[in-house]
Image (cartoon, rainbow, N blue to C red):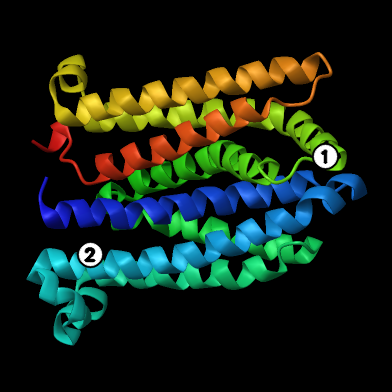
Protein backbone atom coordinates (compact mmCIF):
# COMPACT_ATOMS: atom_id res chain seq x y z
CA UNK A 1 0.00 0.00 0.00
CA UNK A 2 1.62 3.24 -1.17
CA UNK A 3 1.67 6.41 0.88
CA UNK A 4 -0.49 8.43 -1.51
CA UNK A 5 -2.96 5.54 -1.85
CA UNK A 6 -3.23 5.37 1.93
CA UNK A 7 -3.83 9.11 2.17
CA UNK A 8 -6.60 8.94 -0.45
CA UNK A 9 -8.32 6.19 1.54
CA UNK A 10 -8.06 8.03 4.87
CA UNK A 11 -9.28 11.25 3.22
CA UNK A 12 -12.37 9.51 1.83
CA UNK A 13 -13.39 7.83 5.09
CA UNK A 14 -14.44 11.03 6.98
CA UNK A 15 -16.33 12.19 3.90
CA UNK A 16 -18.35 8.99 3.77
CA UNK A 17 -18.90 9.17 7.52
CA UNK A 18 -20.12 12.76 7.25
CA UNK A 19 -22.64 11.91 4.52
CA UNK A 20 -23.76 8.79 6.35
CA UNK A 21 -24.30 10.57 9.69
CA UNK A 22 -25.81 13.63 8.04
CA UNK A 23 -28.36 11.51 6.20
CA UNK A 24 -29.04 9.53 9.36
CA UNK A 25 -29.57 12.71 11.36
CA UNK A 26 -32.05 13.99 8.77
CA UNK A 27 -34.01 10.73 8.84
CA UNK A 28 -33.99 10.57 12.65
CA UNK A 29 -35.15 14.19 12.94
CA UNK A 30 -37.97 13.50 10.48
CA UNK A 31 -39.02 10.52 12.62
CA UNK A 32 -38.83 12.53 15.86
CA UNK A 33 -41.65 14.91 15.04
CA UNK A 34 -43.88 14.03 18.01
CA UNK A 35 -43.32 16.37 20.99
CA UNK A 36 -41.97 13.69 23.32
CA UNK A 37 -39.33 12.36 20.90
CA UNK A 38 -38.41 15.86 19.75
CA UNK A 39 -37.86 17.09 23.31
CA UNK A 40 -35.74 14.07 24.26
CA UNK A 41 -33.60 13.54 21.17
CA UNK A 42 -33.86 16.44 18.70
CA UNK A 43 -31.22 18.69 20.35
CA UNK A 44 -28.66 15.87 20.27
CA UNK A 45 -29.58 14.97 16.70
CA UNK A 46 -29.11 18.57 15.56
CA UNK A 47 -25.68 18.65 17.22
CA UNK A 48 -24.75 15.47 15.39
CA UNK A 49 -25.93 17.02 12.11
CA UNK A 50 -23.72 20.06 12.71
CA UNK A 51 -20.71 17.91 13.56
CA UNK A 52 -21.31 15.84 10.43
CA UNK A 53 -21.49 19.04 8.37
CA UNK A 54 -18.18 20.32 9.70
CA UNK A 55 -16.62 16.89 9.17
CA UNK A 56 -17.78 16.96 5.56
CA UNK A 57 -16.06 20.31 4.95
CA UNK A 58 -12.86 19.06 6.59
CA UNK A 59 -13.02 15.87 4.51
CA UNK A 60 -13.22 17.70 1.18
CA UNK A 61 -10.18 19.78 2.16
CA UNK A 62 -8.35 16.56 3.04
CA UNK A 63 -9.29 15.10 -0.35
CA UNK A 64 -7.60 18.04 -2.11
CA UNK A 65 -4.50 17.80 0.07
CA UNK A 66 -4.26 14.02 -0.45
CA UNK A 67 -4.56 14.49 -4.22
CA UNK A 68 -1.81 17.10 -4.14
CA UNK A 69 0.45 14.71 -2.21
CA UNK A 70 -0.29 11.99 -4.78
CA UNK A 71 0.93 14.34 -7.53
CA UNK A 72 3.93 16.02 -5.92
CA UNK A 73 4.76 14.15 -2.71
CA UNK A 74 4.44 15.70 0.77
CA UNK A 75 5.54 19.08 -0.60
CA UNK A 76 2.40 19.15 -2.74
CA UNK A 77 0.22 19.74 0.32
CA UNK A 78 1.86 23.12 0.95
CA UNK A 79 2.57 24.11 -2.66
CA UNK A 80 0.15 26.73 -3.97
CA UNK A 81 1.01 25.77 -7.56
CA UNK A 82 0.20 22.11 -6.96
CA UNK A 83 -2.99 22.93 -5.06
CA UNK A 84 -4.07 25.30 -7.86
CA UNK A 85 -3.44 22.51 -10.37
CA UNK A 86 -5.50 20.09 -8.28
CA UNK A 87 -8.55 22.21 -7.44
CA UNK A 88 -8.69 24.68 -10.35
CA UNK A 89 -6.84 23.50 -13.45
CA UNK A 90 -7.53 19.75 -13.40
CA UNK A 91 -10.64 17.89 -14.54
CA UNK A 92 -10.72 16.27 -11.07
CA UNK A 93 -10.80 19.78 -9.61
CA UNK A 94 -14.01 20.55 -11.50
CA UNK A 95 -15.76 17.69 -9.70
CA UNK A 96 -14.04 18.64 -6.45
CA UNK A 97 -15.46 22.17 -6.56
CA UNK A 98 -19.02 20.84 -6.85
CA UNK A 99 -18.27 18.50 -3.96
CA UNK A 100 -16.84 21.39 -1.91
CA UNK A 101 -19.83 23.64 -2.65
CA UNK A 102 -22.33 21.01 -1.53
CA UNK A 103 -20.29 20.19 1.60
CA UNK A 104 -20.37 23.85 2.64
CA UNK A 105 -24.11 24.05 1.87
CA UNK A 106 -24.77 20.99 4.06
CA UNK A 107 -22.74 22.47 6.92
CA UNK A 108 -24.67 25.76 6.75
CA UNK A 109 -28.08 24.09 6.42
CA UNK A 110 -27.40 21.80 9.39
CA UNK A 111 -27.62 24.80 11.70
CA UNK A 112 -31.37 25.09 11.04
CA UNK A 113 -32.18 21.39 10.78
CA UNK A 114 -34.47 21.30 13.82
CA UNK A 115 -37.19 23.50 12.31
CA UNK A 116 -39.47 21.84 9.73
CA UNK A 117 -38.47 24.13 6.86
CA UNK A 118 -34.85 23.99 7.91
CA UNK A 119 -34.97 20.19 7.85
CA UNK A 120 -36.30 20.26 4.27
CA UNK A 121 -33.44 22.57 3.23
CA UNK A 122 -30.95 20.32 5.03
CA UNK A 123 -32.34 17.26 3.21
CA UNK A 124 -32.07 19.04 -0.15
CA UNK A 125 -28.41 19.97 0.42
CA UNK A 126 -27.65 16.41 1.52
CA UNK A 127 -29.29 15.10 -1.66
CA UNK A 128 -27.09 17.43 -3.73
CA UNK A 129 -23.95 16.26 -1.88
CA UNK A 130 -24.89 12.61 -2.42
CA UNK A 131 -25.59 13.28 -6.10
CA UNK A 132 -22.12 14.71 -6.79
CA UNK A 133 -20.12 12.45 -4.43
CA UNK A 134 -19.59 9.49 -6.84
CA UNK A 135 -18.06 11.67 -9.51
CA UNK A 136 -14.81 11.92 -7.53
CA UNK A 137 -14.44 8.13 -7.67
CA UNK A 138 -15.40 5.07 -9.73
CA UNK A 139 -18.65 6.73 -10.78
CA UNK A 140 -16.84 9.47 -12.72
CA UNK A 141 -16.66 7.46 -15.95
CA UNK A 142 -20.39 6.93 -16.52
CA UNK A 143 -23.51 8.99 -15.82
CA UNK A 144 -25.64 5.90 -15.17
CA UNK A 145 -23.01 4.27 -13.00
CA UNK A 146 -22.60 7.50 -11.05
CA UNK A 147 -26.38 7.74 -10.60
CA UNK A 148 -26.51 4.18 -9.26
CA UNK A 149 -23.66 5.00 -6.87
CA UNK A 150 -25.66 8.01 -5.66
CA UNK A 151 -28.76 5.88 -5.13
CA UNK A 152 -26.70 3.29 -3.25
CA UNK A 153 -25.16 6.00 -1.08
CA UNK A 154 -28.56 7.59 -0.36
CA UNK A 155 -30.36 4.42 0.73
CA UNK A 156 -27.31 3.19 2.65
CA UNK A 157 -27.14 6.51 4.47
CA UNK A 158 -30.85 6.40 5.26
CA UNK A 159 -30.38 2.90 6.68
CA UNK A 160 -26.93 2.68 8.26
CA UNK A 161 -26.61 6.41 8.91
CA UNK A 162 -29.74 6.39 11.01
CA UNK A 163 -28.39 3.39 12.93
CA UNK A 164 -25.12 5.21 13.66
CA UNK A 165 -26.89 8.41 14.70
CA UNK A 166 -29.33 6.58 16.99
CA UNK A 167 -26.41 4.71 18.55
CA UNK A 168 -24.68 8.01 19.28
CA UNK A 169 -27.91 9.56 20.58
CA UNK A 170 -28.52 6.59 22.89
CA UNK A 171 -24.97 6.62 24.22
CA UNK A 172 -25.55 9.57 26.54
CA UNK A 173 -26.61 9.24 30.16
CA UNK A 174 -29.73 7.05 30.24
CA UNK A 175 -33.13 8.51 30.95
CA UNK A 176 -36.62 7.09 30.68
CA UNK A 177 -37.68 9.83 28.27
CA UNK A 178 -34.74 9.13 25.95
CA UNK A 179 -35.29 5.37 26.04
CA UNK A 180 -38.99 5.73 25.20
CA UNK A 181 -38.24 8.28 22.46
CA UNK A 182 -35.60 5.99 21.00
CA UNK A 183 -37.99 3.05 21.04
CA UNK A 184 -40.67 5.13 19.29
CA UNK A 185 -38.23 6.25 16.58
CA UNK A 186 -36.95 2.70 16.02
CA UNK A 187 -40.54 1.50 15.71
CA UNK A 188 -41.22 4.07 12.99
CA UNK A 189 -37.83 3.49 11.37
CA UNK A 190 -38.00 -0.33 11.09
CA UNK A 191 -40.23 -0.52 7.97
CA UNK A 192 -38.16 2.15 6.22
CA UNK A 193 -34.94 0.42 7.27
CA UNK A 194 -36.15 -2.77 5.58
CA UNK A 195 -36.96 -0.91 2.35
CA UNK A 196 -33.64 0.98 2.36
CA UNK A 197 -31.65 -2.17 3.19
CA UNK A 198 -33.31 -4.00 0.28
CA UNK A 199 -32.57 -1.09 -2.08
CA UNK A 200 -28.97 -0.91 -0.83
CA UNK A 201 -28.56 -4.65 -1.38
CA UNK A 202 -30.04 -4.57 -4.88
CA UNK A 203 -27.98 -1.59 -6.03
CA UNK A 204 -24.90 -3.08 -4.39
CA UNK A 205 -25.35 -6.35 -6.29
CA UNK A 206 -25.57 -4.48 -9.61
CA UNK A 207 -22.48 -2.41 -8.81
CA UNK A 208 -20.58 -5.50 -7.66
CA UNK A 209 -21.40 -7.28 -10.91
CA UNK A 210 -20.22 -4.29 -12.92
CA UNK A 211 -16.90 -4.16 -11.10
CA UNK A 212 -16.23 -7.85 -10.40
CA UNK A 213 -17.89 -9.54 -13.36
CA UNK A 214 -17.39 -13.17 -12.30
CA UNK A 215 -17.07 -15.54 -9.35
CA UNK A 216 -13.33 -15.78 -10.03
CA UNK A 217 -13.11 -12.00 -9.78
CA UNK A 218 -14.94 -12.14 -6.45
CA UNK A 219 -12.86 -14.92 -4.90
CA UNK A 220 -9.52 -14.53 -6.62
CA UNK A 221 -8.77 -10.80 -6.43
CA UNK A 222 -7.99 -8.35 -3.63
CA UNK A 223 -10.96 -6.22 -4.70
CA UNK A 224 -13.29 -9.22 -4.57
CA UNK A 225 -12.10 -10.26 -1.12
CA UNK A 226 -12.60 -6.72 0.17
CA UNK A 227 -16.12 -6.83 -1.24
CA UNK A 228 -16.80 -10.10 0.60
CA UNK A 229 -15.56 -8.46 3.81
CA UNK A 230 -17.98 -5.59 3.26
CA UNK A 231 -20.83 -8.03 2.66
CA UNK A 232 -19.99 -9.83 5.93
CA UNK A 233 -20.15 -6.51 7.83
CA UNK A 234 -23.49 -5.66 6.21
CA UNK A 235 -24.84 -9.11 7.16
CA UNK A 236 -23.80 -8.49 10.78
CA UNK A 237 -25.63 -5.14 10.72
CA UNK A 238 -28.74 -6.84 9.40
CA UNK A 239 -28.59 -9.49 12.14
CA UNK A 240 -28.31 -6.87 14.90
CA UNK A 241 -31.16 -4.86 13.40
CA UNK A 242 -33.35 -7.93 13.13
CA UNK A 243 -32.79 -8.77 16.81
CA UNK A 244 -33.73 -5.23 17.90
CA UNK A 245 -36.76 -5.31 15.63
CA UNK A 246 -37.86 -8.52 17.34
CA UNK A 247 -37.45 -6.82 20.73
CA UNK A 248 -39.56 -3.88 19.54
CA UNK A 249 -42.32 -6.24 18.36
CA UNK A 250 -42.43 -7.77 21.84
CA UNK A 251 -42.75 -4.31 23.39
CA UNK A 252 -39.22 -4.17 24.82
CA UNK A 253 -36.91 -1.14 24.50
CA UNK A 254 -34.03 -1.42 22.01
CA UNK A 255 -30.88 -3.13 23.25
CA UNK A 256 -28.18 -0.44 23.33
CA UNK A 257 -25.44 -3.03 22.90
CA UNK A 258 -27.00 -4.19 19.63
CA UNK A 259 -27.36 -0.59 18.42
CA UNK A 260 -23.69 0.05 19.26
CA UNK A 261 -22.64 -3.12 17.43
CA UNK A 262 -24.68 -2.04 14.38
CA UNK A 263 -22.94 1.35 14.41
CA UNK A 264 -19.48 -0.25 14.73
CA UNK A 265 -20.15 -2.56 11.78
CA UNK A 266 -21.48 0.41 9.80
CA UNK A 267 -18.23 2.32 10.33
CA UNK A 268 -16.28 -0.81 9.36
CA UNK A 269 -18.37 -0.98 6.18
CA UNK A 270 -17.40 2.62 5.38
CA UNK A 271 -13.71 1.86 5.91
CA UNK A 272 -13.88 -1.09 3.52
CA UNK A 273 -15.81 1.05 1.02
CA UNK A 274 -13.05 3.67 1.11
CA UNK A 275 -10.51 0.92 0.40
CA UNK A 276 -12.64 -0.43 -2.46
CA UNK A 277 -12.86 2.96 -4.16
CA UNK A 278 -9.05 3.18 -4.27
CA UNK A 279 -8.52 -0.43 -5.39
CA UNK A 280 -8.42 -1.45 -9.05
CA UNK A 281 -11.42 -3.63 -9.78
CA UNK A 282 -11.16 -6.84 -11.85
CA UNK A 283 -13.06 -5.44 -14.81
CA UNK A 284 -10.42 -2.70 -15.14
CA UNK A 285 -7.44 -5.08 -15.01
In the displayed structure, does residue 2 sit left or right of residue 230? Answer: left
Q: Is residue 88 above or below residue 249?
A: below
Q: Position of residue 267 (x, y in %)?
A: 44, 40
Q: Is residue 284 above or below residue 129?
A: above
Q: Nearer the viewer, residue 71 or 121?
A: 71
Q: Position of residue 185 (x, y in %)?
A: 77, 37
Corner quadrant of residue 248: top right
The residue that mark 2 highlights is: 66
Q: Nearer the viewer, residue 234 or 97?
A: 234
The residue that mark 1 highlights is: 181
Closer to the N terminus: mark 1 or mark 2?
A: 2
Residue farthest bottom in this picture: 80
Dot 2: few (<14), some (14–19), or many (≥20) neighbours within 10 Å?
many
Corner quadrant of residue 66: bottom left
Dot 1: few (<14), some (14–19), or many (≥20) neighbours within 10 Å?
many
Q: Secondary structure at mark 1?
A: helix
> Can residue 123 be seen?
no
Q: CA distance from mark 1 to mark 2?
A: 41 Å
Q: Residue at x 15, y 67 (%)?
A: 69
In the displayed structure, does residue 44 sit left or right of residue 234? Answer: right
Amino acid sequence: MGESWSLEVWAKLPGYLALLCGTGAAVALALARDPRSAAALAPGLVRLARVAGLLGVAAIVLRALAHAVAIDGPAGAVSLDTLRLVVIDSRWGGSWRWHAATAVAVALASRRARAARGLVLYAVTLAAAILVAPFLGHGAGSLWRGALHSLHLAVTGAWLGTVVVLALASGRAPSDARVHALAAIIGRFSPWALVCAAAAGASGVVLAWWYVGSVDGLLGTFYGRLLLLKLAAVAAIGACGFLNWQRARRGHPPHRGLITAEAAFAVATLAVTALLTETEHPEAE
